[in-house]
Amino acid sequence: MRKLCFVKRLFVTLCITLITCTAMAQKGSITGTIVDENNFYLPGATVLIASLNKGATTDFDGKFSMLAIPAGTYQLQISFLGYEDLEQEVTVLENQITTLAIALQPKSVTLNEVEVVSYGLSGQAKALNTQKNNINITNVVSTDQIGKFPDANIGDAVKRISGVTMQVDQGEARNIIVRGLSPQLNSVTLNGSRIPSAEGDNRNVQMDLIPSDMIQTIELTKAVTPDMDGDALGGSVNLVTATAPQQFRLSSTLGSGISFITNKRILNGALLIGDRTKDKKLGWMVAASINDTDFGSDNIEAEWTDEFEYYTGVDDVDGDPILEEVDVNPYTNAFETRKYLVQRVRRSFSANLDYQINPNHNLYLKSMYNWRDDRENRYRTSYEMLDAEDIEAGDFTITNGFPSSFPAEVAKETKGGIDNNRNKNRRLEDQRMQNYSLGGKHFLGKVKADWMVSYAKASEERKNERYAKYETEYTVVNDFSDSEFPMLSAENPADATAFDAFEFDEITEEYQYTEEEDVNFFTHFELPASLFGTANGTLKFGARGRFKNKSRDNNFFEYDLESTYPTMDLTGLKDLSNDAFLAGDKYNLGGYIDANWLGALALVNGESVPSEFLRANYNVSENVWAGYVMTTQNLTDKLQTLIGVRVEATQLKATGNQIEDEDDLVGTVTKENAYTNVLPGVHFKYAPNNNTVFRLAWTNTLARPNYVDLIPTIDIVSGDEEIFIGNPDLKATTSMNFDVIGEYYFKSVGLLSGGLFFKKINDFVYQYQEEASSDALGTGTTGYRVYQPLNGDAATIFGAEFAFQRQLDFLPGFAKNFSFYLNYTFLTSKATGIRNEDGEERDDLDLPNTAPNLLNASLGYANKYFNARFSANFSDAYIDEIGGNSFEDRYYDQQFFLDINIGISLSKKLSLYGELKNITNQPLRYFQSVRSRTQQAEFYGQRLTFGLKYDLY
């Protein structure tokens, strides 16, 4: 409470200062816009009045402002990497704003080099200039840098940045991991406004929802400043959409392609159009994109155990079976093959407006709507060893310490959806994300003020999601010749095709809906303030409010069709025996229930199954109030510092269903929590010359727990024998961060950088696991696996980053048109306070999701008529999920992606492109405890796309 009162008093004092400074305004100001030779904005250009030691940097819209300039005539010095320096005389009048429009020209060494710079490096120069002139540690990627890689969605583009790796879904990068920290520990914004999450059980933002061609610039902030949201433990990613141009612009893309795993087509198209009125006051930009891909994946999954028991044939005095334990080596006791057939249609629309009322006042309106339909069929065969009491001596074989055969329950399951124009006999996942923001930038005498209000919503809806499952039992053989490709299969091959022996288990239909709504606002005020006797400094302060509501509403129905379709042979069947399976030829998929048959069923009078959904439904509201104050001071003409503090107050209310006897709803239970975080930060930037920059930062950040983890309920999943317990008492994770980095910027547009970082993390969240020893959590739950999120004690992360990118223009002849891009990150971590299933603390663990080595590399070639690029992305294996003990730990395996893309210029405005992705057929792979024990391997094959691009400037 004292902290909040202090913030309120501080804010009132700053407002009084603001009013006073506005009234005292006696000097003039300079504002302007800097563009290139094509009238495109130049972000990151530096503007300097050397005689006053005052400077400014242009924003993403090429705009800059310099406040409190004494009346007089000055020489402005403008510089930008890859462009000629410019000096321009400007006269400042008292109490007036002088507005400038400045155009820079590329450096003209030779005609050919100019063409190379304008064709291949202009966007990269914009990104590097912004990165160079920021006071804090950032990585900036521009439109043309994104376009150099075959990345259909923004997640695949972000993974190219130093210190970033991604978790994939169906071969596309979805969840962002920054500097080894989980997706929910990082923030993602769109034009500075938070992007909500459509995921029901976490805070992850679905990066594959946004097409890469809708984004102009990606800015990854690794050391946040006090005017930014504090919940960015690893970093904050800001996606910037295109703004209205200075003159008419039209750009379009039309393409096609093929996904080789299905041999089906890919369609994509994009359109961008914008203009500005003759008086330059009103500008508009509209962009649209669509991508329709028919693809899939081939998947194997396995569970490993080092225990084997069987029934001796004797019962104890209580009538319970007496079991005999056999010493065995780790083996596969459960196994699945899965084939996914997916159609993913990604649509996006963006509209932006800006209006200059007068030189002192500007307004803008930005919007984006993303809509993705994900239609999926899944054909799954699962094998699971029978319970020990159902296995007798003689039912199994042990070979060299491995159970080589044993009786198993075998199931054939098909996932699909209703037969209509939306589902098309497939499970339809309808994900949408929309974001609308209104804001303004104003000059009030000496004071620069800007504000924004925004509304955002993300939703995920699954209607008429259907499953059909039939089961049988037979003896399986365990192929343990290669543990990286485990397999269980029928000892008698005829058992696998005896569909008349597969008996009805269930036909179900599910309805799922999750949504998250965000209302945000912020205000910033900045005014000149020299606190250390320097001639150039600013004081900035402001406030932010974020009001979030998230809910999940699921339903589940069972249909008893056993009397009509008692065995699988009486259903419609689909034979996948001849389908290629990328995991290996030894896996024979066989027959399944046809998804078209399942979709055509008239399912009526279903029985609701409350135990499947009541505990999963919830409602959470989270309100965050924040205020900050910071000052930026030029201590010398080479040394700059930023000092400030941010305070965030969080109020949380979580409501879940109160259940008795697994399916009786007796009411709701609500838990409230409130806490305040004080987040100071200090940044130093030292630039001994125009091309060299050193940065040092000390920052403090936080991460709030996942919403579903806070729900005060117990979720019993009987089918999987699992129990999930919420924990409304979870604390927010906090981190103290130290960063140091040095950068050298090549005059020919390029970068060489190296840095170190350290994070001290408290109260990180991990998933505790144990086996239920009684029925205390529900009747018949003894032996169920119990999961509950808990706070660990502390963790540390130490890392090093290196980056190099450059046009190799120092080489002779055609070789000067080559370019090289490389970044490498090393991470090491240590976590304490994690307990195993026996309650003992484990001392052998890294912090989950910290990949020790990350590498991006590419070699490109570009001239006026042709460009090509080979690109590689590598991330090392890391622990993904902490088990009850080290044997049960799950790891995300290393990944190596290799892609190639080419472009051919047919004219100045028209070009051809071609892209081949995942040349190495890199699978998504998890392993249990050691790399040789595959837990999941999912293969996607290659994708080829090609088409035309048209740009009218």
Image: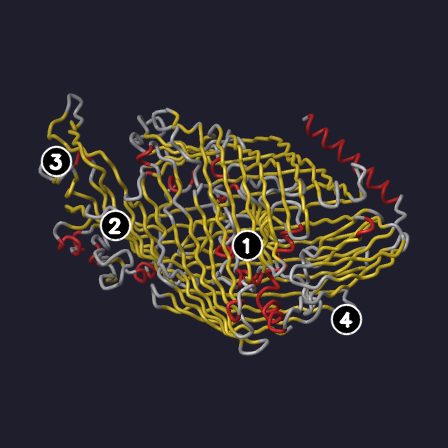
Q: Which mark is residue 278?
A: 4
357 w.r.t. 681: above or below: below
The C terminus appears in which quarter of the rendering? bottom right
Towards the viewer: 910 or 153: 910
Instruction: Give how far apart the Cα atoms at labels 1 and 2 are.
Output: 39 Å
Q: Which residue is mark 3?
A: 392
Mark 1 or 2, closer to the camera:
2
Say whether marks 3 and 4 touch (CB < 8 Å).
no
Q: Is residue 393 left or right of residue 871?
A: left
Q: Which residue is mark 1?
A: 433
Secondary structure of the residue carrying numbered label 4:
loop
Neighbours of disc 2 within 10 Å: few (<14), some (14-19), many (20+) = many
The numbered mark, 3 or 4, whose residue comes first in the sequence reads 4
Say whether marks 3 and 1 touch (CB < 8 Å).
no
Q: Which residue is mark 2?
A: 485
The numbered mark, 4 or 2, whose residue comes first in the sequence reads 4
296 w.r.t. 774: above or below: below
Towards the viewer: 677 or 652: 677
Neighbours of disc 3 within 10 Å: few (<14), some (14-19), many (20+) = some
Residue at x-position 18% and y-position 50%: 489
Instruction: Give how far apart the Cα atoms at labels 4 and 1 are.
Output: 34 Å
The numbered mark, 2 or 3, whose residue comes first in the sequence reads 3
Q: Three-letter amino acid code at disc 1?
A: Met
Secondary structure of the residue carrying numbered label 3:
loop
